[in-house]
Amino acid sequence: MDSITVIPGDGIGPEVVECALQVLDVLGIGLSADVLDHVCADRYRRDGLALNEADLARVSASSAVLLGAIGRPDLEETDYVRGVLLSLRHSFDLYANCRPVRLWHDRLSPLRDPASRMLDCVIVRENTEGLYSGIGGNLRTSSPQEVAIDADINTWHGVSRILDYAFFTARREVCLVDKANAVRAGGRLWQECWRRSAERHPETATRHLYIDAAAMKLVTEPGRFDVIVASNSYGDILSDLAAALAGGIGLAPSASLNPESGFGLFEPVHGSAPDIAGQGIANPFACLLTAGLMIRHLGYKTEAAAIDAAVAGSIAAGRVTPDLGGSLSTREVTRAVLAAL
Ligand code: NAD
Ligand code: IPM
Ligand code: MN
């Protein structure tokens, strides 16, 4: 039996993870779940602990992690968020962050012209380098002369493997997004690795856009994209933008993978949504679709397709939470999905 680690987290995290666990239960695939509900903002505030060795050992003993969301605005949260999310991504070298975005129903598109709305792409985000390296610091702190430096680390190894992974994921095209016209060193490295990776994958069409133009094109011609590959921070930003085009962040799943070891961390793209936490109205779809990505990765393809179909059915029938224009609660939406399954 596959075992997974579950980190519900903070805010709406536990609210949507509860729904996902019910859905997994109904599918009857017999996953055993080790729930680390002590990994949360309360413990961090009390003990200054994000993830400790014992937690990491429990994660290591499982096949995958399902995480709700981490973060609370009343905390000095950089160290906490880094201590949980970035620590998991780095500890298991989860360099490929896949964020599929698809328009589940025409009604959800913010664009007026129906012909221009289609969207079904995957954002492949480099997940272990870039501006998230943690290298840097503050000079002359708290003085009018303060200078803050965050190194944007890009390695040949890290860039090549994410580009190759993007080609591996693509159906018809890979679009590289960078800022090589302005950012010199990293720009050069990405461009050189890009040329070589494209040569290794001649069967796939390629396209290159600078990040500013890519943001625009995602809105004006979303249907043209297949796989978008980008650095850690550009991929982060584009995935929220794409999620909005597909009806909202409450629908966006994500998988952080190490394709060599097969280990994965599965979490919705959204955060802990403190503005709606505790109201029972969080959209559970992102977390359900994330659970779907997780079980597909573990080999349960039929069950994963059943989750997708049940979500699509709920959306088509208007059984949705307020963020999608409905009036149902998190639990009512989950009941509709469970009934469909
Ligand atoms: P957020 O994604 O939590 O919220 C942005 C907006 O989207 C809010 O208005 C929120 O109500 C709405 N929203 C998000 N998820 C929703 C859902 N399932 N249903 C309905 N509406 C939803 O982003 P933020 O406000 O920038 O960050 C809040 C906290 O979450 C911060 O502490 C941040 O660091 C953290 N965060 C964590 C993760 C993660 O754990 N993977 C991801 C992003 C942000
Ligand atoms: C995400 C989040 C995280 C990120 C934050 C909370 C560190 O925005 O998973 O998209 O930027 O990676
Ligand atoms: Mn993000």
Image: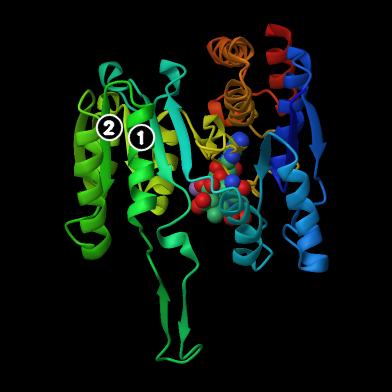
* Residue drawn at (43%, 28%) of the image: 101
User: Which of the 4 image quarters holds residue 156?
Assistant: bottom left
| Tag 1: amino acid | Ala
Give the secondary structure at mark 2.
Answer: strand
| Residue 290 spot, x, y in % from top left | 59, 29
Mark 1 or mark 2, which has the lower sequence index? 1
Whole-number angstrom distance, CA of label 1 to CA of label 2: 7 Å
Q: Is residue 11 left or right of residue 172?
A: right
* Residue drawn at (43%, 87%) of the image: 146
- Locate the C terminus and report the quarter of the image it occupies: top right
| Tag 2: amino acid | Val
For disc 1, the neighbor class at 10 Å (few under 14, some 14 to 19, many from 20) is: many
Q: Is residue 15 left or right of residue 174?
A: right
Q: Are circles 1 and 2 on residues that touch, CB within 8 Å?
A: yes
User: Which of the 4 image quarters holds residue 328?
Assistant: top right
| Residue 188 spot, x, y in % from top left | 20, 57
Q: Is residue 1 left or right of residue 80?
A: right
Q: On the image, numbered disc 1 is attached to which residue? A: 166
Which mark, by number, is residue 174? 2
| Residue 160 spot, x, y in % from top left | 33, 46
The response on whether ligand 2 sits within 8 Å of label 2 is no
The reply to whether residue 8 is visible in this rendering is no
Q: Nearer the viewer, residue 150 or 68?
A: 150
